Image (cartoon, coloured by chain):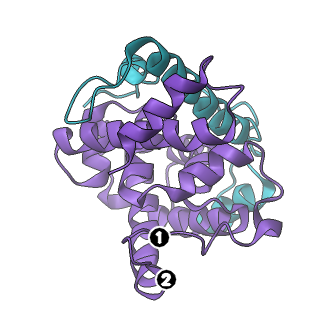
Amino acid sequence: MTEKPKGPDPNMNNPAEAGTKPRSGGLDRQIQAKIGQQLRAMYDEVVDQGVPDRFAELLKKLDGAQSTPKSEEDSRK
Amino acid sequence: MTTDPATLKIIMAIVPKLRAFAISLSGNVDRADDLVQETLMRAIANIDSFEPGTNMQAWLFTILRNRFRSEYRKRKREVEDADGHYTDSLVSQPEQTSKLEYKELRAALEKLPSDQREALILVGASGFSYEEAAAICGCAVGTIKSRVNRARNRLAVELDVKSIDDFGPDRNTRAVLAANDRR
């Protein structure tokens, strides 16, 4: 297992593997590329919201009296 | 018990990704944030079982995923429909998803069986390798690959029908595509 996850799977746009029905090539790839893109955009939109205060406070509380840095907006790798 | 400040910092940095994963799984911000909270509580309580040097993000995702699945299994018994799919119980409450963008995509995700949904999100959005996703879901790599493929194909059909202009130039080709995927 690698320490850091790699970027999104480059094969996302190549669904012609592992037990699925192959479908018309070019259009299918186009659709899959678009879906992959949307999926990541949807996901990243949430990631970009950073750490809500609720969780920054929770982590502090959970860790008892220990002080932790203020919530880190810049949390993306 | 105290947790190493460096470890806390690492956990904090992963929180936004945990939220994105939880929201993608549940389609519901409030429920997702509850899941994240439970995950953090568990993680801190069990921090001793985390092996330093291994992938903290994968560890946290595993905890969250297992929380979601055990909750899901409970709900599934109540709402599973004849097709064996967990359908409208979450998306049928529009006010809960109104804060979210990408409504069509989220609605299509909700229609996927949850094992396909989680596989697709882990590999296609979170950026985990197939191997890491398999470890998180506790299944074989081949299983993850086939779930991801089935999820992609179903999403294609789902979104194809709904946003014709976005997804492909040719009505006839789309019709063939859609027909291919109906069993």
At label 1, the amino acid type is: Tyr
Residue B46 locus on image (x, y percent): 39, 65
Q: Is residue A21 left or right of residue B2?
A: left
Q: Residue at x 56, y 30 (%)?
A: A35
- Relative vertical location of residue A22 with respect to residue B116 in this rendering, above or below: above
Q: Is residue B58 left or right of residue B142?
A: right
- Secondary structure beneath disc 1? loop
- Relative vertical location of residue A28 with respect to residue B16 in this rendering, above or below: above
Which one is nearer the viewer's eye here, B24 or B81? Answer: B81
- Output the chain of dot 2: B
Q: Residue at x 44, y 31 (%)?
A: B176
* Chain identifier, colour cyan: A
Residues at discs 1 and 2 in contact (Cβ within 8 Å): yes
Residue B158 locus on image (x, y percent): 55, 44
Q: Indicate the quadrant where residue B74 lies.
A: bottom left
Residue under label 2: B79
At label 2, the amino acid type is: Val
Which one is nearer the viewer's eye here, B66 or B183? Answer: B183
Which one is nearer the viewer's eye here, B125 or B173? Answer: B173
- Relative vertical location of residue A41 with respect to residue B3 in this rendering, above or below: above
Which one is nearer the viewer's eye here, A7 or B119? Answer: B119
Q: Residue at x 83, y 68 (%)?
A: B95
Q: Residue at x 44, y 50 (%)?
A: B117
Counting other residues with Cα less than 10 Å from the Cα at mark 1, is it few (<14), some (14-19), or many (20 or more)?
many
Label 1 – label 2 distance at C-alpha? 7 Å
Q: Is residue A49 left or right of residue A30?
A: right
Residue under label 1: B86
